Amino acid sequence: MSTRFEFRETPSVITALEVHEAEAPPPAERLYDVLLAMRIQLVALAESISDGKSVVRLSVCELDGAPIKPPRRRALVQEIAPLFTRAAAPDPEPSSAPARTPRRAA
């Protein structure tokens, strides 16, 4: 099974990305964090089965609301592709230690 990424044209500023045959779809929060780091907003996320195979549909756009242009699309796929494989390491659990208060400059 090979994960395949496919962009679909839409009549709006939303860019539709389909991930076919994902080995292990990531948690939405992890995907959101990676996209936000790229300054891309996740508008919608839907998982379904088509012809017996997993399909994850992402609706995304730039943070300013612009559609994602082809060079950014390639970068987007490179960043999120590892998240859709079983080899992707899960996020470490947050520690149970209390949060430290930042020190103030003297």
Image (cartoon, rainbow, N blue to C red):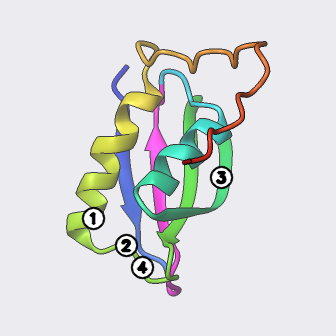
Question: Residue at point 61% right, 46% down?
Answer: 104
Q: Is residue 95 above or below residue 55?
A: above
Query: Horizontal and vertical percent for residue 81?
Result: 36, 36
Q: Which residues are magenta?
A: 11-22
Is residue 8 on the magenta stretch? no
User: Disc 3 residue type?
Assistant: Leu
- Residue for badge 2: 68
Q: Residues within 10 Å of mark 4 (few under 14, many from 20)?
A: some
User: Disc 4 residue type?
Assistant: Pro
- In primary-sequence order, the first of circles 4 and 3 is 3
- Residue for badge 1: 72
Q: CA distance from mark 2 to mark 4?
A: 4 Å
Which numbered circle lies on residue 41? none
State the residue in front, 81 or 92. 92
Which numbered circle lies on residue 45? 3
Q: Helix, strand, or loop for circle 3?
A: strand
State the residue in front, 3 or 83. 83
